[in-house]
Image (cartoon, coloured by chain):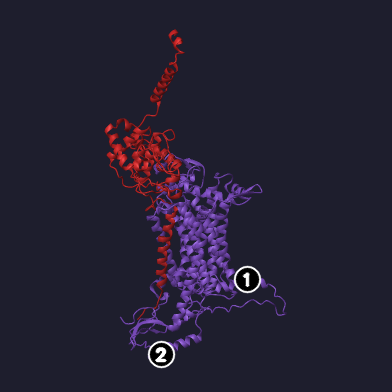
Chain colours: A red, B purple
């Protein structure tokens, strides 16, 4: 202790304490901070390098060479910063064909993916190295086999409370202001639904694991899949669009058909037979 | 061949001889044969035209509604008490919900034929209101509401309003997410009524929304109160129809004083009865193959939940659209909030539509000064202002429909929701004016075409080449019957300026009103083409008869086409 007390006024003591403090804070931070993408951990350096090459060719023109986004003069951006969006965001955006966008639009539409699964994985690996973000979800989120009735019912409750306001009760999608929209959920894979919830792409809010636990996420997915795979009870459905399509059918099929019947009955009088 | 009547009296047929006993037994006790003879009901004559059967679609779908609705009452439980669902539809299994919703799920999944009957009921309801509107449009376009049928017109308006309320009540009963959202809409509408709004809400919902009495109350309204009123008004509508006799299209032998058509028995009984089966069969087919209101997909009502694509059934769509496109105006005075943003579109606007509709026969009578009875229909082209006015109203209604489905249109056609809203906001005021002008011009054009056909005959398809090389098409006069049909409407009245002074030379009383009326009459008849006069026709006949010195021969050798465009000789 004596040694310490004699040296505590040493000119370099401050620097030493500072270094120690930084070391402790950094050590604690690296120990407890959010675990970066598991894909990034498992991804080889080759993937990261290949991903960076793909990024520079296909993405950098909007997102910037360092993926930090490109601002416009008006303060908007051509492409937002991708630092910290995580592998899940890349897998969702590129995997559903939303990125790269074909043209400027209020919202990136889903289309056939431009990149193969391998390339998508490489891009995700590269973006994951830029900053901590949600990883590509594993079975905990996406495995819906063996879900019980109770879990599906729970998923339905979460779905109706959090999702149907935009996505419609059967996932047929819905409109948002200014040409934006909530896309339909028909044919979207469990992984992509989970990624959308985790990363909140485009207009969608983020439903983090603190808000909706991984199990609840998988319950929601199970409910969506259950509802979409069950038969259309009651006959041909109007695309799940509700009373608007039903009104259209009422007028076109219903009134249209009965008008034809009325014309038919009106045209067949009890006429005297011609000789 | 001779036209000997091969009619055999029914009592002389084999069936008649067998049936004579029981029928005689009944007639001895009920006296129906004598009564029906005295009232002439069975021999009542109805004119024939397809457009006279539109009201029947509404009538028969109402019968379908009564039949299927009765079936549904056997299982539906109008209660908002909570229960746990344990039926066949597993995704909702174990969920807390109201008895109303649970029993509707049971009807859909666990009652044999329940879903079919529910869907027939819903399609028939949508068709009921649609048929009423189509029927109403026919009556309006042909001027069938004119004296003496104004009261029947008002009864029709009453039926329409009742039909809307009845439909809405039925839409609310299952207590699914969509019906609850619809009820919330009505709750907002009630609250928007200035000053009394919140009291009214508490009165109707038995407290704050949603409360626990609204579904039992709506159930009573839906299965007892309004159906009884509808039945009574339909009865009155029918009695007046029989009393006034049905209107008919003008033509040879058809006057204001007769009705040309077929008797109730056997022809119209068969036609109408047959049409009932067509309507029932058609709604059953729709119920069987087309899904409507899949309540299981919406889930039970929960005020914290909502689904995209929440719309009312189509007949409330215009109100929904009006609310959606309304700017968010709101003001506060006298310590009350005045929600113009809801009150104007949801309460005032539908009132305006119905008020104008109800007042129209009387307004038109005031403008035209026509107090005569009318049993002959007016062709839409011969009343250009009226026809254009109806089309303008339909356009406004259509714009509101677009507004009501703006989100569906936006997603399906990849349009901006805001752009559609602005289109509707401007279109609601501009498009009816545009369609009014277009329709009026079309009517006037058709009137001119009629006059042309009277004066210049029809095109025979016979082309002549003159010695100097010119080609002309021969025209032939229309058959007299067609000429009569085209000209048996009234001449336009002579427009006169109202007298400024009375017979004493003093300023006439009501002169301001008279001036207004003269102005309205001028606008009403503006542009209308009068039918040709007798002199015009005589002059034209001479002209037609003498075509370059060669009269048109319509004898057996004639090679042209008839007035309907069908070649005479194939």
Q: Residue furthest bottom?
A: B549
Q: Which residue is mark 1?
A: B516
Residue B177: give x, y in percent of width and height. Answer: 47, 46
Tell me if B172 is positioned left or right of A124 in this view.
Answer: right
Residue B381: give x, y in percent of width and height. Answer: 48, 73
Please report contact status of discs 2 and 1: CB closer than 8 Å, yes or no. Answer: no
Q: Is residue B217 visible?
A: no
Residue B188: give x, y in percent of width and height. Answer: 56, 49
Say what secondary structure mark 1 lies in. Answer: helix
Identity of the residue drawn at 34% across and 80% down: B567
Tell me if A129 is positioned left or right of B441 in this view.
Answer: left
Q: On residue B546, which mark appears?
A: 2
The verdict on a common chain for dots 2 and 1 is yes
Q: On residue B558, which mark appears?
A: none
Q: In the rendered view of the protein, which quadrant contains the N terminus of chain B? A: bottom left
Quarter of the rendering containing residue B555: bottom left
Distance, label 2 to label 1, CA atoms, is 49 Å
Identity of the residue drawn at 42% across and 77% down: B9
Whether B102 is drawn above or below B398: the answer is above
- Front in this rendered view, residue A264 or A48: A48
């Amino acid at each position: 202790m004596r040694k310490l007390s004699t040296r505590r006024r040493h000119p370099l003591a401050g620097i030493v304490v500072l270094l120690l403090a930084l070391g402790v804070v950094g050590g604690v931070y690296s120990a407890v901070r959010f675990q970066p993408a598991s894909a990034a951990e498992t991804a080889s350096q080759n993937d990261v390098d290949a991903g960076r090459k793909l990024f520079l060719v296909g993405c950098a023109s909007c997102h910037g060479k360092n993926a930090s986004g490109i601002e416009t003069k008006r303060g908007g951006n051509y492409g937002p910063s991708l630092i910290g969006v995580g592998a899940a965001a890349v897998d969702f955006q590129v995997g559903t064909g939303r990125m790269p966008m074909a043209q400027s639009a209020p919202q990136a539409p889903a289309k056939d993916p431009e990149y193969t699964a391998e390339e998508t994985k490489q891009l995700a690996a590269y973006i994951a190295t830029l900053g901590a973000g949600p990883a590509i979800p594993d079975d905990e989120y996406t495995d819906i086999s063996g879900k019980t009735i109770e879990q599906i019912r729970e998923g339905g409750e979460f779905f109706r409370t959090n999702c149907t306001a935009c996505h419609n009760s059967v996932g047929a999608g819905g409109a948002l202001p200014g040409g934006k929209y909530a896309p339909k959920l028909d044919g979207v894979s469990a992984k992509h639904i989970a990624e959308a919830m985790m990363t909140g792409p485009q207009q969608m809010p983020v439903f983090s694991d603190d808000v909706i636990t991984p199990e609840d996420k998988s319950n929601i997915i199970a409910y969506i899949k259950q509802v979409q795979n069950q038969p259309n009870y009651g006959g041909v459905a109007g695309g799940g669009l509700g009373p608007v399509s039903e009104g259209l059918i009422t007028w076109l099929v219903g009134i249209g058909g009965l008008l034809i019947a009325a014309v038919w009955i009106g045209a067949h009088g009890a006429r005297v037979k011609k000789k | 061949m001779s036209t000997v009547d091969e009619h055999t009296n029914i009592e002389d047929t084999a069936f008649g001889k067998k049936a004579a006993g029981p029928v005689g037994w009944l007639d001895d006790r009920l006296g129906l044969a004598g009564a029906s003879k005295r009232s002439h009901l069975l021999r009542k004559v109805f004119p024939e035209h397809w457009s006279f059967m539109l009201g029947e679609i509404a009538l028969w779908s109402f019968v379908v509604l009564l039949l299927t609705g009765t079936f549904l009452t056997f299982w539906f439980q109008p209660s908002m008490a909570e229960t746990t669902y344990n039926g066949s539809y597993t995704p909702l299994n174990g969920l807390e919900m109201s008895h109303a919703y649970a029993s509707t799920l049971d009807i859909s999944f666990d009652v044999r034929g329940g879903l079919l009957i529910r869907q027939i009921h819903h399609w028939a309801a949508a068709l009921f209101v649609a048929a009423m509107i189509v029927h109403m449009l026919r009556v309006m376009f042909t001027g069938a509401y004119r004296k003496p049928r104004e009261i029947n017109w008002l009864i029709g308006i009453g039926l329409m309003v009742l039909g809307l309320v009845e439909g809405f009540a039925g839409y609310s009963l299952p207590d699914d997410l969509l019906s609850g959202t619809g009820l919330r809409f009505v709750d907002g509408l009630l609250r928007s009524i200035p000053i009394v709004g919140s009291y009214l809400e508490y009165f109707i919902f038995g407290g704050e929304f949603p409360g626990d009495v609204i579904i039992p109350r709506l159930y009573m309204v839906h299965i007892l109160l309004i159906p009884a009123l509808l039945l009574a008004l339909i009865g009155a509508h029918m009695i007046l129809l029989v009393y006034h006799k049905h209107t008919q299209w003008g033509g040879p032998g058809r006057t204001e004083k007769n009705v040309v058509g077929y008797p109730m028995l056997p022809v119209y009984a068969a036609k109408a009865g047959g049409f009932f089966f067509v309507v029932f069969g058609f709604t059953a087919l729709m119920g069987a193959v087309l899904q409507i209101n899949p309540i299981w997909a919406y889930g039970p009502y929960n005020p914290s939940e909502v689904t995209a694509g929440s719309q009312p059934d189509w007949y409330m769509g215009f109100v929904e659209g009006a609310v959606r496109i309304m700017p968010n105006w709101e003001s506060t005075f006298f310590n009350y909030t005045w929600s113009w943003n809801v009150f104007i579109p949801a309460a005032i606007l539908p009132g305006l539509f119905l008020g104008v509709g109800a007042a129209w026969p009387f307004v038109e009578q005031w403008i035209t000064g026509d107090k005569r009875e009318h049993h002959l229909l007016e062709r839409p082209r011969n009343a250009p202002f009226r026809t254009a006015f109806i089309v303008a109203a339909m356009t406004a209604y259509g714009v509101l429909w677009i507004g009501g489905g703006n989100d569906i249109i936006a997603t399906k056609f990849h349009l901006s929701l805001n752009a559609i809203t602005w289109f509707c906001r401007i279109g609601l005021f501009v498009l009816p004016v545009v369609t009014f002008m277009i329709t009026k011009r079309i009517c006037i054009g058709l009137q001119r075409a009629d006059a042309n056909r009277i004066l210049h005959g029809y095109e025979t398809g016979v082309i002549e080449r003159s010695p100097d090389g010119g080609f002309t098409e021969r025209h032939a006069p229309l058959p007299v019957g067609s000429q009569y049909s085209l000209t048996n409407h009234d001449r336009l009245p002579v427009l006169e300026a109202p007298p400024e002074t009375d017979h004493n030379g003093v300023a006439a009383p009501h002169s301001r009103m008279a001036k207004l009326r003269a102005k309205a009459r001028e606008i009403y008849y503006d542009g209308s083409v009068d039918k040709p006069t007798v002199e015009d026709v005589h002059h034209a006949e001479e002209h037609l008869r003498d075509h370059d010195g060669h009269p048109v021969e319509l004898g057996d050798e004639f090679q042209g086409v008839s007035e309907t465009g069908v070649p005479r000789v194939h």
